[in-house]
Image: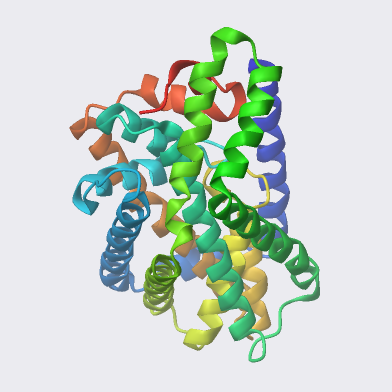
Amino acid sequence: MQMLKRWQFWVGVIISAVFLYLALGGLKLRDVWETLRSANYWWLVPGVAVYFVAVGFRSWRWSYVLRPVQRVSARRLFPIVVIGYMGNNVYPARAGEFIRAYILWKKAGINIGSTLTTAVLERVFDGLMMLLFVFVALPFAPLPEDLRRYMPIFTMLMVSAAAIFFVLAMLPEQMRRLYTWIIDRAVPQRFRQPIHGLADGVLRGLQILRSGRDVFIVFGVTLVIWLLETVKYWLVMHCFDFRVSFLALMLVNGVVNLATIIPSAPAYLGTFDKAGSEVMIRFGVPQTAGTSYILLLHAVLWLPVTALGFFFMWRESVSWQDLGMAARIKEQGRESQQVTGT
């Protein structure tokens, strides 16, 4: 299993290296450096502030989605959300979602199946919002052809995931009978109880979808989150001497975040940068300026939340062993053997 992990990691590194090469291809790195050196970095101060306001809304959204399972305040969840973002930035395969589910289980005793399901559900809402951003902006800013080819795939993935979650949420008893039948026949006796607890937790994590009002509220908060994220893109743009419209930056936001679905090294290195630079070129921004902007934006999205994540790790007494255990959930399924439903 360790070999499989190394194989997956190195595939991500290779993919990131290829995309980073494509993003920087044809550029003179000295020109990129000069563009970055002459940028007005004071604009990063409000940009980072707006970003953490968006993280605060993310914490509130997670608190709201968790309400049918257990009430946890947004203030209590904020450090865990930040640690999860840090996990995404230093571990491959979006391990941060597993990390924050694992930490919340340790801190509040909430079934890890429920917390992980709510975290994945949030990502589905985010993906649908990114698609909305892309489709709203497309009439004003057509996508490059190579990116346009991937849009049906992204759309199918997000819509399929949402449809599956809604079916699971609306038919809980039927789903419970189905997985009970499968577990009781396919799983050894000693593992049945924890796996039943994990599966029950998944269904509880989807309860928010049974209320149209709750779905509307979560979707509305998701819209606020991503508009705030786009405001950050707009503020970082002012570090440079070019300007594009807010709609154009909505498209950039949507495309670069959809591109993170592609397997890559931690922090979506390469995939984020190539997708963003392609869209900036489409808006007539010179390649050197547009790529410099995307590289700076990527760094600002990575560094502050990662640094704060390390601080919250220390404050919340979260160890590297905890993060390592959580990062292995996806590959090894150990939590299904260790955690019972609560």
Colour mode of the rendering:
rainbow
Q: Quadrant of the N terminus?
A: top right
Q: Quadrant of residue 44?
A: bottom left
Q: Is residue 96 visible?
A: no
Q: How many marks?
A: 0
Taking the spot 59% from the left edge, 58% from the top edge, the residue there is 272
| In this view, 282 is above or below 311 | below
Residue at far bottom of view: 140
Judge from the rendering whether residue 190 lies leftward or rightward of residue 287; answer left or right: left
Taking the spot 50% from the left edge, 42% from the top edge, the residue there is 203
Judge from the rendering whether residue 107 lies leftward or rightward of residue 96; answer left or right: left
Q: Is residue 248 visible?
A: yes
| In this view, 92 is above or below 18 | above
The x and y percentages for residue 20 are: 66, 53
The x and y percentages for residue 72 are: 24, 46
Q: Is 203 in front, or is 300?
A: 203
| In this view, 280 is above or below 174 | below
The x and y percentages for residue 336 are: 52, 22
Q: Quadrant of the C terminus?
A: top left
The x and y percentages for residue 135 are: 64, 80
| In this view, 262 is above or below 334 | below
Taking the spot 64% from the left edge, 55% from the top edge, the residue there is 161
Q: Is 154 in front, or is 65?
A: 65
Q: Quadrant of residue 264?
A: top right
Q: Is 93 in front, or is 57?
A: 57
